[in-house]
Structures are given as C-alpha cells and as structure tokens.
Amino acid sequence: MKLILFLRSKTFWLNAALALAFFTLLGLSANWILKGITGHGEVEVVPDLTGLTWEEAQARLAEGALQAEVLDSSLYFPKMDPGTVVDQYPMAGATAKAGRTVQLSINRRRPGRVALPLLVERTLQRAELDLTSRGLRVGRITFVPDLAEGLVLSASAGGVVLAEGSQVRKGTAIDLVVGKRSGPPTHAVPNLLGMRFGEAKAILQLSGLRLEWVEGDTTMTQGVIISQLPSDSQGMFVTHKDGVVRVWVGESHLLQSNDEE
C-alpha cells in the first residue's frame, strides 16, 4: 500500500523526470563528443581534380577539409599536360568524411624511353604496328625507288638515323624511308607448278625474277612446286625485274589433289 502511494507521489515523478533528463543529456553529450573526435556527420563531396596540378589539387581539396596523396606518377599520357592529375580515388562526385585522403595519379613530366623495334626490311604495315604498340608514332613516310617494294629501308627521328634497340622516348615520331618500284610492270610470272625446286629457280633467273622458298623439303626426290605466289600470269606483265616469286614445295600427289579441287 505504501509503494502504491509512493508511486503516485510528486516526489517519485519529480525524481523520475530528473533521472530521464540526466540520461538524455548524458547521451547527447557522448554523441557530440564522438562526432567531434571522428568527424562523423561531416560529409564532403569529392571534387573533380582531373587536369589540375598537384598544388591546385591540394588547394581544392583543402576547401572541403580533404587531403591529397600521390598514388602513382609513373604513367605518361601525351594528351594530358605534364604534372597534372589524370586519375583519382575516390572518384569525383563521391562522398567522403572530412579529413579523408584522396589518392591522385599524376601525369609524369617526361615520357619514359623504349627500345626501337626492328623496322628495316619489315613491311610498312608491320613497322607501323610495331611502332604504335611501343607507344611511338609514325612520322613522315618517304618513298624512294628501290627493288624492295613496300619494305622499310631506314628509320630516323629528328634527322638522326636510328638502329634497332635505340632508346627513344614514348610519343616520338619515327620517320620511315620505304622502297617503291617506279614505272609499270615489265615482267610476267611463269607457271612453276610441278617443277622441281632447282628447275623452278633456274627458270625464274632466266626470266629476270627471284625465287623465295616458303615451306617444304627442297631435297626430297619427289619434291615439286605445289603452290606459288604470284601465280602464273599467262604472259601478262605483273611485276618488275628482280621481283620475288614465293614457292611451296611438296610431294607431287599434293599438287594433283590441288588440281582436282
């Protein structure tokens, strides 16, 4: 009975109200202290730093209570200014707590060096592919009269002739000199199919052409020419003096099979 009277008394409710206020104030105080220590609740939007210098990126991040850190500076992008930001993490538009570090990739000030690939006696198409795969550019292409039709004769940069393995900076323009026959074709390609290798070679020499062996055993007794490129031109002029005819050697029955097909 006394407990019920106490619970209904003003003293109980006053004490209960004071206790509730105390614990509420304690909880709010602890939350405010935690926020002050961790920065919880202070969220910043990460700005786009692409194209800014290191100093500009630092200043921009400081405006939002963020910090900058270099993650990588070994890459070189020719379309970006040297020393500028090319990538960042977190990305632009992401949210981060105040004090968060944003990692930056900086475009190096000078491109690295690479070894010049083998270009001389390569076809122009192959040379262009090898240059671009190494981060180099194809510069001026000069065609000069030469029997090596379509083959690179020399490579240079800035007027200096370069050899295979020369160290050049990425992005350098490599000038090429390429052979090109002049004038209309002057020689026909004879039919070599079924001939022995030595016989075909002699026929081409008499015709003012050169033979290039591609595949097959040229020493076997039954070996004959089973394929050729260019093929028999049937008297029409299709190449120049010293033009190359490529041949494949095999057994005669392979030639018969090809004829049947």
Image (cartoon, helix red, strand yellow):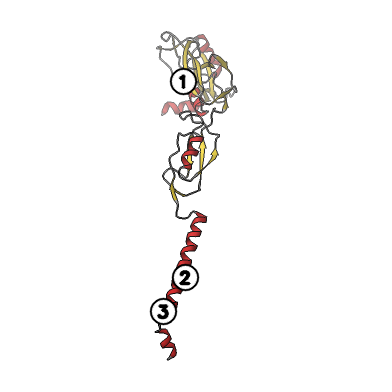
The label on residue 229 is 1
Q: Answer whether residue 251 is visible to the viewer in this image.
A: no
Give the distance between the C-alpha atoms of the residues marked 2 and 3, in whole angstroms.
14 Å
- The quadrant where residue 121 appears: top right
Q: Are marks 3 and 1 in contact (CB under 8 Å)?
A: no
Is 156 drawn above or below residue 47 in the view shown? above
Q: Earlier in the sequence, mark 2 or mark 3?
A: 3
Q: Residue at (48%, 19%) from the top-left corner?
A: 139
Is 183 drawn above or below residue 81 in the view shown? above
Q: Residue at (48%, 61%) from the top-left corner?
A: 31
Give the x, y percent position of residue 54.
51, 35
Give the x, y percent position of residue 112.
56, 28
Give the distance between the C-alpha atoms of the residues marked 1 and 2, in whole angstroms.
99 Å
Give the distance between the C-alpha atoms of the residues marked 3 and 1, in whole angstroms.
109 Å
The label on residue 13 is 3
Q: Secondary structure at mark 1?
A: strand
Name the amino acid, label 1: Leu
- Tell me the crowding category of disc 3: few under 14, some 14 to 19, or many 20 or more residues within 10 angstroms, Cα based: few
Q: Secondary structure at mark 2?
A: helix
Q: For the C terminus, which image quadrant?
A: top left
Q: Answer whether residue 17 is visible to the viewer in this image.
A: yes
Name the amino acid, label 3: Trp
- Tell me the crowding category of disc 2: few under 14, some 14 to 19, or many 20 or more residues within 10 angstroms, Cα based: few
Q: Residue at (43%, 86%) from the top-left corner?
A: 6
